[in-house]
Image (cartoon, rainbow, N blue to C red):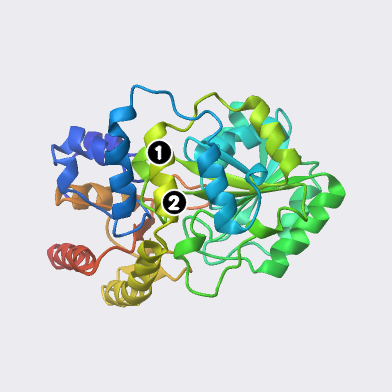
Amino acid sequence: MCLCMSVMAVLSSPHGSDVWLIERVLGVNAVRIVDFSSNVNPYGPSPRAIRAVIDKLWMVSSYPDDEGAKLREKLAEHYGLKASNFIVGNGSTEIIYMFSLLFVGNGSAGIHIPTFSEYERAVTAYGGTCVFTKPHIYDQPNVNELLELMDHDIKAIFICNPNNPNGAIMNFKEIEEVLYEAEKRGVYVLLDEDFIELADEGTVKSFICEVGRFENLVVLRSFTKSHGLAGLRVGYAAAHHRLVERFEVIRTRWNVNLLAQEAAIAALDDAEHVEAARRLVKREKPRLKHEIERLKWLKPIYGHANFLLIEINQGPTSLKLKAELARRGILIRDCSNFKGLNERYIRIAVRRNWENTMLINELKRLSEAS
């Protein structure tokens, strides 16, 4: 591990997929980096989505549809809901910030940890405060722990299911129990299902089709993960139409660009592309876990999503390991900045067979060199 501390400090990033940062700092061409830090579809975007972008390039001098009408209609058709049940955003992160502004404000929100840091960041951006569960590294908090958060006079609660970064899940009945109690107490719930489409088959049931039952529920989704459209920034949420109307009041005009809307519509038509990614993850995740376990100094923690949280039992810190692998053209997620974790944890996405083999081989070389 020969990289200097100043370089490693620069490589510390709040999120994964910082390929441009690696390119600037280490001089490794971003195009040549194999990115295990971003949990997106291992096949990238659907060819249909790419064609849709190419076909509409000539229209980039035009404003996008401000209401995202075609995309919302497509989502309604896809899920058997109404267009009025959907809000679209510049990535799902924009919707997290809108939710925080609308339903938390300068109040408090409940968050289980470790989880996606933008929930806390969005809450504090508008003057709010956060109440946290104890850290759950191997599983999700139980229902009682989430209900206890509500005893702190919170206005909203964030639940990530499957959870990032450990892939842990709550079952349908557990979340339903939380929703009923939250509704009684006037607490809003953001249920982040960004990773649900690439989760282990049959393990997680979505709540998108339940938004008519719960007027306090916002179900978050994204075209980033399962559809591989991270660079276009397009996300969406399903909610009761009365909640969607409140989002529309504060939504930034033209927030989803023209090409993003067209790509998202086309991606929804390519169910086989997502299904192929599911089959790949089902095949490659056990192999990846097994090979990493054999290294002894790394302990993969099994989760139900398309990534693995890994504990470093001995040897380099997470940031040192990230820096050394980045120098070799491989990018992993340093998890030291997840609340509830420390410098002994990393996260890797499940990618294609040859890429997973490349990571395993580099980890073996590091083991032999230490």
Q: Position of residue 48 (x, y in %)?
A: 32, 52
Q: Are marks 1 and 2 in contact (CB under 8 Å)?
A: no
Q: Amino acid at mark 2?
A: Asn
* Residue lying at 78% horizontally and 56% vertically, measured from the top left: 213
Q: Residues within 10 Å of mark 2 (few under 14, many from 20)?
A: some
* Residue lying at 55% horizontally and 73% vertically, measured from the top left: 203
Residue 260: numbered disc: 1
The residue lying toward the viewer, choosing from 24 and 182, is: 182
Residue 96 occupies quadrant: top right
* Residue lying at 19% horizontally and 41% vertically, measured from the top left: 30
- Can see residue 10? yes
Left or right: residue 139 versus residue 231 is right
Q: Is residue 124 above or below residue 120?
A: above
The residue lying toward the viewer, choosing from 198 and 64, is: 64
Residue 268 occupies quadrant: bottom left
Dot 1 or dot 2: first in sequence order is: 1
Q: Residues within 10 Å of mark 1 (few under 14, many from 20)?
A: many
Determine whether the residue tagged by mark 2 lies in a helix, strand or loop.
loop
Q: Which quadrant does the C terminus fall into?
A: bottom left
Real-space CA distance between mark 1 and mark 2, rounded to the nearest whole angstrom: 36 Å
Residue on which disc 2 sits: 342
